[in-house]
Amino acid sequence: MEHDGKVIGTATTVFYENRFAWIGMVLVDSEFRKRGIGTELLKKTIEHLDDASIHTMKLDATPQGKPIYAKLGFIEEYEIERWMLKRPHAKTSAKPVATCGPLSEVQKQRVFQLDKALFGADRGFLLRALCEESPELAAAVWEDESLQGYAFGRAGLFADHLGPWMARTRPAAEGLLQEFLAKSSHETLIVDCMKSNSMAVELLRGFGFAPSRALTRMFRGPNSYPGRPELFCAILGPEFG
């Protein structure tokens, strides 16, 4: 959405095979809010996805946006909570655990395959991009050749973001979190944690993170590929799912 040549609102979509699409970055300039611009952007996005024959749409809603999405047919699925840590120094004393390390191509393929089953669709193209942009923040935990957990990270302008973060056991979850803390370079760290995952919540709190805002995962249309959200500690991010 533009006004006098200036961008005042945005919305994005990401296609995950033909299973569902993700809606993100529904943003409106603060000077132009409460004028229905966000709703119009969302309607245009839905129209675009309908034209592409994508019948299932998902997004992560803020408390302010949730009523708008509900009016347009989106249904609540589960709750997410953003946790933040502000460190006094860019590095911590946390040490990477021995089971974590750079991912080989074979290991990446195994991670992508498992993530497809857990997320509900193939997003290997995104995970591979994360590996290429921040290889030091991509790690996995193995036990007797069995994949116990994996995590990816993004280095932002002002903060590093952990996610997706998946672990079958607490030791795997803790090892991956320690690895992220040791390898991340920013003082501010962000994790969009599954609110129902008590293991992840306890670990984040134990390492000094604090909740900062709530998000609600919502969907429109048939939720035919829900994945296994209970196995995730944290999502990739509200822009991507």
Image: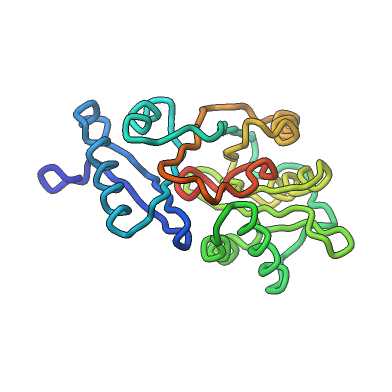
In-image side of 33 versus 78 (left or right): left
For the residue pair 188 and 39, the one nearer the viewer reads as 39
How was the colour assigned to the protein in this rendering?
A: rainbow
Query: Where residue 157 sits in the image (x, y, percent)?
Result: 47, 48
| Quadrant of residue 101 within the rendered picture | bottom right
Q: Is residue 132 above or below residue 165?
A: below
Query: Where residue 222 sits in the image (x, y, percent)?
Result: 46, 46
In-image side of 32 versus 221 (left or right): left
Query: Where residue 11 sits in the image (x, y, percent)?
Result: 32, 46
| Residue at 83%, 44% in the rendered image | 171
In-image side of 97 versus 47 (left or right): right
Q: Total marks drawn?
A: 0
Outermost residue to the left: 4
| Residue at 83%, 57% in the rendered image | 99
| Quadrant of residue 204 within the rendered picture | top right
For the residue pair 4 and 81, the one nearer the viewer reads as 81
| Residue at 65%, 64% in the rendered image | 113
